[in-house]
Amino acid sequence: MKYDLDRLMRDRALDAIVISGKIYGNPALYYMINGAGLTRAKVIKKRGETPVLIANAMERDEAKAAGLPVELETKYDYSGLLKEHEGDALAAGVAYFLRILADHDVQGSVGFYGMADQGSAYTFLRALQEAASDIEVVGEFDGDIIAEARATKEAPEVARIRDVGRRTVKIVQDTVAFLKHHRVGDDETLRKADGSTLTVGDVHAYIGRQIALQGLEEPVGFIFATGRDAGIPHSKGTLSSPLRLGESVVFDIYPCEHGGGYFFDMTRTFCLGYAPPAVESLYQDVRDCIEHICAAIQVGEEARRYQQMTCEFFKQRGHPTVAENPGTLEGYVHGVSHGVGLDLHERPMFRDVSSNTTTLQPGHVFTVEPGLYYPERGMGCRLEDVVWIDEEGTPHNLTDYPYDLVIPL
């Protein structure tokens, strides 16, 4: 949580942190400015002190929504520095940052975070380090302090995730109603009013409209895949494919708040009209697994244990898993969980590796999403809910939607 930042900075011997870049697609900066509607900004935080927001003068009113002390970029006169350095953007940028750091008396170890092109960030930070005698530029590769703080959510964050979940469920409900509205042709394909075949592309278009109507965004798309495509976990579906009775349909939807805020993530698998025995068997194994994992969630348990439990469960049911063969393309082929927040995939992580010492804690919000995939048999199944652990350590399922396999037509 955000109040953990000073402790995390102390644990990592950081005297200050700088978070910068564009706001959209930059969870670290969005987090620090509390989602204020800015285009780009910088935040300077010294250990033990309140962060300071440096904003564009044209966005000075929007900057107030961050709830932080605000300074305007004009104070540091980048344009003047660019003239002074004869148009050399790198030299001017370094001088500009040195002015900011000096004005805030930043010294010692300084961590840099945010979003920028990798090459330009590398070049800039090297140049800044060469020019600065009283700071040490620090970068973190994995598990940086912003990501660590974001891993546990405060009540207002959970409320926003829950609200996105409510709207996401409404989209799924409306999509199912849309499918049920169509008649079935003699060839067991769904037909539109004009008699033409309803395709996956038609459903994609409908889902996209519903996401917009709910005031949400789909920055990384969604999955509505049928038949063989349902057997490939991240196949979004072949747009020209017809909707047929009896085929497994994987509907994985993960929108976020407008403006790049909090995500939700849910998946349901269903068949239209009826489910063939093979799909029904696959579905039952996945449903039994998600119920088994959800029942075992408890504070203090190692996160990696849930991946182990999932592999053990599916192995007992006779399916290949990544525990026995990490390269398997059939059976259970992915991880069972990931954190959800300002990123679709964030901490806590559930990888079954010895270096993953993460334990479940109050404030964690994460998915539970076992799945089984057999593309060459033309089927796949995944079920996914979002779980939050409250401050008392009690898990709550935030996905209020049934697991029904068959959608009657």
Image: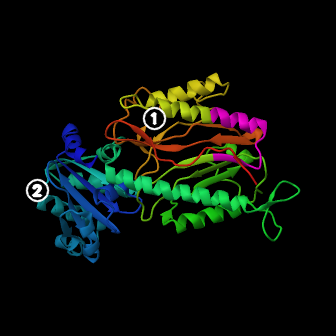
Which residue occupies 72% across, 37% down?
Answer: 280
Secondary structure, mark 2, is: loop
Position of 283 with respect to 36 (left or right) is right
The label number, if any, that marks residue 105 in the structure image: 2
Q: Position of residue 289 (x, y in %)?
A: 58, 32
For badge 1, the amino acid type reads Phe
> Quadrant of the rendered structure where residue 233 is?
top right
Q: Position of residue 28 (x, y in %)?
A: 33, 54
Q: Which residue is mark 1?
A: 350
> CA gap, disc 1 to disc 2?
40 Å
The label number, if any, that marks residue 320 in the structure image: none
- Closest to the camera, between mark 1 and mark 2, is 1
Position of 241 with respect to 22 (left or right) is right
For badge 2, the amino acid type reads Asp
Which residue occupies 16% across, 63% down?
Answer: 99
Q: Residue furthest right?
A: 186
Which residue occupies 71% across, 55% down?
Answer: 238
Q: Is residue 183 above or below residue 327?
A: below
> Quadrant of the rendered structure where residue 373 is?
top right
Count of numbered circles in the view: 2
Pick whichever, 140 or 251, lies toward us: 251
Specify how the rendered protein is coloured: rainbow
Q: Position of residue 48 (x, y in %)?
A: 14, 48
Asked whether residue 229 appears in the rendered view, the answer is: yes
Q: Is residue 87 above or below residue 191?
A: below
* Magenta span of residues: 269-286
Q: Position of residue 132 (x, y in %)?
A: 17, 54
Indicate yes or no whether the magenta region holds residue 376: no
- Mark 1, Cα crowd under 10 Å, few <14 / some 14-19 / many 20+, is many
Pick whichever, 302 or 140, lies toward us: 302
> Quadrant of the rendered structure where residue 92 is?
bottom left
Which residue occupies 42% across, 61% down?
Answer: 260
